């Protein structure tokens, strides 16, 4: 939710800010802005719309070697020019960008207004530059003023501020991500690494309570009391070209097509002699685990369902829980409960809250995430990375596949460690088949008929997705992806549930996508027959000679493989279906309306 970038160094900051914002647009895209400082005042340029709209308002590149930028996903106030960041104090000497939510802004605003501060927006953020200005008056020192200002704020924030006449950036974080990029000649701050990856891969992940001051030739990190702190510099192993669209029209298509590579990276070095080996979690690491709770939201929840099913199949009590419901559905938790946060970004507020609750109740916590240094990775007892590389399209694609594979590996690692568990009888066959998965995804991408099918079914009233077992979670994910980027009505159901109500929706105008995996697909086949007899076009999504193909009108084919992986391959077909339907409908595929990739508010 919202992306921020800041840069200080020699030369003009504007290009870096604009390209950084483009790479952060997945975090919000309803307004954008930059502010630069060049010794003759702080210059702010902002507007509603996305970064390209901002660029078109700039006659020339504003000059200044120190700057901040923001791309917004609205929380307080509609996406207007006034509500776009950066925000300034009354005189326009202090400019601030902010990601997060200030809970006590109302009270602060009233107090500041009583002291003569004039506000121009509806946002919670605007109190921050006014507070800094107020405390500069009283302390005579900007760094102290920033420290006092953030100390006054309640809620969550990652902020970056610039001040007229100072060649510096001040920044702080609490509850919202902020990462420092370290280069020989310039420094960067951003909500996420892709914002500056083309310039440096050396990073420092800031932590809650950190305050940083960047100058052209140095940076200083302190806590809120002003005590110096030391943080290690990490090297990110993401490729800068991963951050751009490359030859593709959309990030989503690029990310769908990069799944063979992403999956190879997910698997690499983790299967050793028919066993699963996570370097930091050696055999025996999970010997005490008696039950597993997988907490997640949206697409990650669908991946968690997949993982939960594999764990249960191995005899380990496991549940996938919607993170937003965790408080009321978690049930008993103790030190033998493993609470797994499944989160691509590692920053989803509901997922973080759930895993914190699990930890407070005595559970052991683990993050399965894509983002090194993310809040989930730092706050949990252990982390396993899915290694999918940066995902920019708002609709999660490659990270879902890498999550499923990571969770499948985790399930077999836990099953091998827990004395009473029964690792999949055919574990060797399943892990062998995993080695072929990247190649099978490649085949799906090369041979898919999803584009044709998307065109043939485009005029439908609604889209129904059904499946059983692994196919159920894939059906839910297929429907989520479809509605998310096409804005068409799509619903996913467990096959056995169709006749308990949803069948009333099925007509000649509602194609039914039946996900079959080669596992227990009988109920799904029954659904297909029932839907077809009511005139609905039926599309089988699964292996070629599957019995479901006999009762279907069309087929999205997946290569023959182990049933555990057939669902994942079927999902790749459904990703392509959604993509092409959205393309034909001319939807803004990478930035669907009202959504943001990283949902950092509850
Ligand atoms: C849908 C989508 C979302 C995310 C959800 C959780 O395509 O991307 O449903 O899966 O917001 O995000 P993470 O995995 O970052 O916790």
Image (spheres, rainbow, N blue to C red):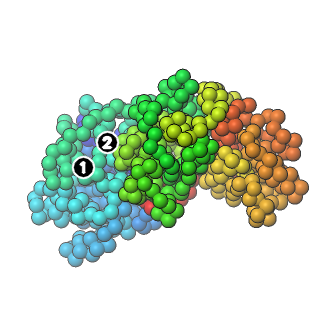
* Residue at figure coordinates x 55%, y 50% from the top left: 318
Q: Which residue is mark 1?
A: 210
Q: Quadrant of residue 575?
A: top right
Q: Residue at x 55, y 41 (%)?
A: 420
Residue for badge 2 = 205
Name the secondary structure under disc 1.
loop
* Whole-number angstrom distance, CA of label 2 to CA of label 1: 10 Å
Q: Residue 227: in sight, yes or no?
A: yes
Quadrant assignment for the C terminus: bottom left
The answer to which of marks 2 and 1 sits earlier in the sequence is: 2
| Disc 2 CB within 8 Å of nearest ligand 1 atom | no
> Is 225 on the left-hand or right-hand side of 523?
left
The disc at residue 69 is: none
Is residue 36 shown left or right of residue 306?
A: left
Circle 1 residues within 10 Å: few <14, some 14–19, many ≥20: many
Residue 105: quadrant of the picture: bottom left
Q: Are marks 2 and 1 in contact (CB under 8 Å)?
A: no
Residue at point 54%, 38% (across, down): 415
């Amino acid at each position: 939710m919202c992306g921020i970038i800041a840069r200080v160094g020699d030369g003009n900051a504007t290009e870096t800010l604009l390209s950084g914002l483009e790479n952060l647009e997945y975090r919000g895209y309803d307004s954008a802005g930059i502010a630069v400082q060049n010794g003759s005042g702080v210059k702010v340029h902002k507007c509603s719309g996305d970064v390209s709209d901002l660029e078109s308002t700039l006659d020339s590149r504003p000059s200044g070697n120190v700057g901040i930028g923001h791309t917004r996903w609205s929380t307080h106030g509609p996406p207007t020019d006034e509500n776009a960041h950066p925000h300034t104090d009354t005189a326009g000497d202090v400019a601030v960008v902010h990601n997060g939510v200030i809970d006590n802004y109302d009270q602060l605003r009233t107090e500041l207004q009583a002291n003569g501060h004039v506000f121009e927006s509806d946002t919670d953020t605007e109190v921050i530059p006014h507070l800094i200005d107020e405390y500069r008056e009283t302390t005579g020192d900007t760094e102290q003023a920033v420290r006092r200002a953030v100390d006054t704020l309640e809620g969550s924030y990652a902020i970056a501020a610039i001040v007229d006449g100072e060649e510096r950036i001040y920044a702080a974080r609490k509850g919202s991500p902020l990462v420092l990029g370290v280069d020989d000649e310039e420094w960067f701050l951003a909500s996420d690494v892709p914002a500056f990856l083309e310039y440096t891969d050396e990073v420092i992940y800031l932590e809650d309570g950190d305050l940083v001051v960047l100058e052209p030739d140095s940076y200083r990190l302190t806590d809120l009391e002003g005590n110096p702190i030391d943080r290690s510099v990490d090297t990110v192993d993401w490729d800068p070209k991963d951050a751009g669209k490359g030859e593709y029209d959309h990030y989503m298509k690029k990310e769908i097509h990069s799944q063979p590579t992403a999956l190879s990276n997910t698997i690499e070095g983790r299967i050793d002699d028919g066993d699963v080996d996570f370097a930091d979690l050696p055999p025996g690491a999970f010997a005490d685990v008696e039950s597993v709770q997988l907490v997640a939201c949206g697409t990650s929840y669908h991946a968690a369902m997949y993982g939960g099913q594999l764990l249960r199949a191995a005899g380990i009590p496991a549940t996938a829980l919607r993170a937003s419901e965790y408080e009321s559905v978690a049930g008993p938790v103790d030190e033998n409960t493993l609470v797994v946060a499944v989160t691509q970004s590692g920053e989803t507020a509901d997922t973080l809250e759930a895993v914190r609750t699990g930890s407070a109740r005595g559970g052991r916590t683990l993050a399965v995430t894509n983002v090194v240094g993310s809040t989930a990775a730092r706050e949990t007892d252990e982390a396993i990375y899915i290694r999918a590389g940066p995902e920019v399209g708002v609709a999660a694609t490659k990270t879902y596949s890498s999550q499923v594979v990571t969770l499948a590996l985790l399930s077999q690692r836990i099953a091998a460690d827990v004395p009473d568990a029964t690792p999949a009888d055919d574990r060797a066959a399943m892990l062998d088949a995993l080695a072929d998965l990247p190649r099978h995804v490649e085949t799906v991408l090369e041979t898919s008929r999803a584009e044709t099918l998307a065109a043939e079914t485009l005029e439908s009233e609604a889209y129904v997705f059904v499946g059983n077992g692994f196919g159920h979670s894939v059906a839910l994910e297929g429907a989520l992806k479809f509605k998310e980027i096409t804005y068409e009505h799509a619903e996913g159901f467990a096959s056995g549930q169709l006749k308990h109500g949803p069948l009333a929706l099925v007509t000649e105008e509602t194609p039914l996508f039946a996900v079959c995996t080669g596992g227990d697909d009988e109920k799904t086949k029954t659904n297909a027959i029932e839907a077809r007899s009511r005139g609905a076009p039926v599309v089988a999504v699964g292996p070629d000679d599957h019995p479901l193909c006999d009762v279907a009108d069309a087929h999205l084919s997946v290569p023959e493989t182990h049933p555990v992986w057939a669902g994942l391959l079927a999902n790749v077909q459904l990703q392509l279906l959604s993509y092409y339907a959205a393309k034909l409908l001319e939807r803004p595929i990478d930035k669907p309306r009202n959504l943001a990739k990283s949902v950092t508010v509850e």
